[in-house]
Image (tube, rainbow, N blue to C red):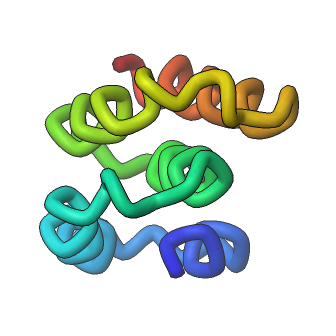
Amino acid sequence: TAWAFATVGVKAHELFNTIAVAATPRLSEFNSQELANTAWAFAKAGVEAQSFFGAVATAALPRLGEFSSQGLANTVWAFATAGV
């Protein structure tokens, strides 16, 4: 997962770009924790993926009530860190 790669410090932007391409059309299938973890991973890895963050925001907005406090905080941190 993107989270696992970011957690161990992988900063392979090509890998994250490939994940973004594969994940974007399926983001509506992600639960709130998966959205938060994925956003966190991209920010942690320093990947510039504004369109991907836009897609995550679109998927997350209707489900904000499903986010835990920690998940919401991680998502906000990710967006702030990514400068989105």
Q: Toward which corner of the image does residue 9 lie, by quadrant?
A: bottom right
| Residue 69, horizontal then vertical, whole percent | 85, 27
Pick out the residue farthest to the right: 69
Picture residue at 57% right of the left edge, 79% below the top: 5
The x, y position of residue 56, in whole percent, is 35, 39
Q: Is residue 13 left or right of residue 83?
A: left
Camera-side residue: 30 or 54?
A: 30
- Residue at (82%, 35%) from the top-left corner? 68
Q: Residue at x 29, y 79 (%)?
A: 15
Question: Which of 18 and 29 lies nearest the eye of the viewer?
Answer: 29
Q: Is residue 8 visible?
A: yes
Do we see residue 45 in this rendering? no
Residue 7, compared with residue 62, is above or below; it is below
- Left or right: residue 79 compared with residue 50: right
Seen at 32% across and 55% down, the residue is 27
Number of numbered tags placed on the structure image:
0
- Please state the horizontal and vertical placement of residue 37, each as a whole percent of the image: 62, 55
41 sits to left or right of 7: left
Q: The C terminus lies in which quarter of the figure?
A: top left
Residue 62: name its quadrant: top left
